[in-house]
Each structure stands twice: as C-alpha cells, then as structure tokens.
Image (cartoon, rainbow, N blue to C red):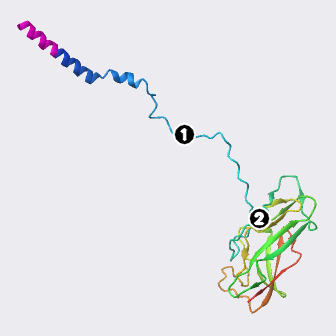
Amino acid sequence: MYRRRRLAVLLVLIVIVAGVWLLIARPWQGKADDTAPTDAVAQPLLPAVSDSTQPTPEPTDSGLPVPGATPGATPGATTGTQPTPAPTGSAKPCSTDDIAVTAVTDKTAYATGVDPKLSIELTNNGKNPCTLNVGTSQQVFTITSGDDTWWRSTDCQTEPSDMVVVLQAGQKVSSAQPITWDRTRSSVATCDAKNRPHAPGGGATYRLSVTIGGISSHDEAAFQLY
C-alpha cells in the first residue's frame, strides 16, 4: 500500500516537471519560426515599378525671354512658339531681309491710371532656318512722343542675358510676358522711379519701337494716353 502511494506521488511529480519544461522550453516555437523569412522585419519597402512607359510631356510654349528687371514689369499670357536652342554649326545667322520685327501694345488708347503693356513679335519670313540672339541683352523697347524719347527699357535693366536660338522658316514668336510702362520718363539716374516725371495724358500720342538681335521693327506702334 505504501509503495503504491509513493509511485503515485512520483508519477504526479514527473507530470508536473514535464509540464513546467514544456512551458519554458516551448519546443514547438522553433518549428513555427523556421517557416518565416529570417529578414522579414528588416526588409525595406520598395516603390512599385510599372511596366508601362510614362509619356514625356511636351514642352510648353514660353516665347521670347522678358527683361524681368525692367521697372514696372508685370506677368502676362504666354504666346507664340518657343524658339529652338541653336545647334552648333547648323543654321546661318538671320539677316534683316528674312526677319520681320513688330512692336506690339495691348491697346491703342489707355484710360487714366491704365499702364500700357509692351511686347515684341518676331517672324522668320525666309526660306531657311536661321540663328538669332533673342536674349534680354538684345531687346530694346523705346517710347517716344514726337522727337522726345520718354522711356527706354535698357536705362535701368540689370543682369541682361544672351539666348541664341534657331528660328525655323515661317516661325513666329512673341514675348512670353509683356512688360509694363509705368507712364514715367526713364533715365539711368532715376532707376528708383520715385522722382520721375509722369507722361502727359489728355489724348497725347506716343509711339513704341523695338529692336531685337540688332534688327529693328519696321513700323512703330502708336497709342494714346488719357
């Protein structure tokens, strides 16, 4: 009887020890871990790669560069076709016989307090492409009244730049943005524009002429100030 009781107690102890060992050792954990990738946590996330090729956007028309440092310059609408940067040793320089330059104003008459907006239009009327420097260093806007020169865009221009382009036969380009005349007399001594005389209104007539790349406009654009 005594031996049976000791055997029963021994069996209970064995069961308890085995249970404790199973809880501590957890032998099943190793088998489950073997099925998972060892670097799952460290694996970086990569962006998805598409098999389809994205279309390249067409370049937007920007027109001729604008003398941005001119006092009173304001943004405007993009017009014309963007000229092509000149490849080395391809087209010949443009001649005055091939290029037509036109001075453009947004209106022919301006009410009191409305400032004229000025642009250049450039056309290659030749049969072949040609190269021309259309940079801000080559653009001159001049406003006169009779024999009196009232305003010149280069009087207070800063950081002028060159831009040699190819103009295709029949191609027409114009200013990407007009520049604004603030209705004052310009000079290199009054670039702050605080003490400049204001142009008379009351229907007075003024004329705009432009030059670009050494080629002058054939005609002047006349307008009135009120």
Residue at (85, 62) in percent of width and height: 171
Q: Which mark is residue 16?
A: none
Q: Which residue is mark 2?
A: 63
The three-letter code of the residue at mark 2 reads Gly
Q: Horizontal and vertical percent for residue 214? A: 86, 69
The three-letter code of the residue at mark 1 reads Leu
Q: Nearer the viewer, residue 41 or 19?
A: 19
Give the structural element (helix, strand or loop) at label 1. loop
- Please tell me which of labels 2 and 1 falls first in the chain: 1
Category of crowding for the residue at label 1, using alpha-carbon neighbours closer than 10 angstroms: few (below 14), some (14–19), many (at least 20): few
Q: Magenta region, mostly helix, strand or loop? A: helix
105 magenta-colored: no
Residue 216 versus residue 36 in the image, above or below: below
Q: Which residue is mark 1?
A: 46
Q: Horizontal and vertical percent for residue 33? A: 40, 25
| C-alpha gap between disc 2 and disc 1 | 41 Å
Give the left or right position of residue 128, taking residue 71 as reference.
right
Category of crowding for the residue at label 2, using alpha-carbon neighbours closer than 10 angstroms: few (below 14), some (14–19), many (at least 20): many
Q: Horizontal and vertical percent for residue 173? A: 81, 65
Q: Nearer the viewer, residue 179 or 37?
A: 37
Q: Which residues are magenta?
A: 1-12
Q: Quadrant of residue 107?
A: bottom right
3 magenta-colored: yes
Residue at (65, 39) in percent of width and height: 51
Q: Quadrant of the C terminus?
A: bottom right
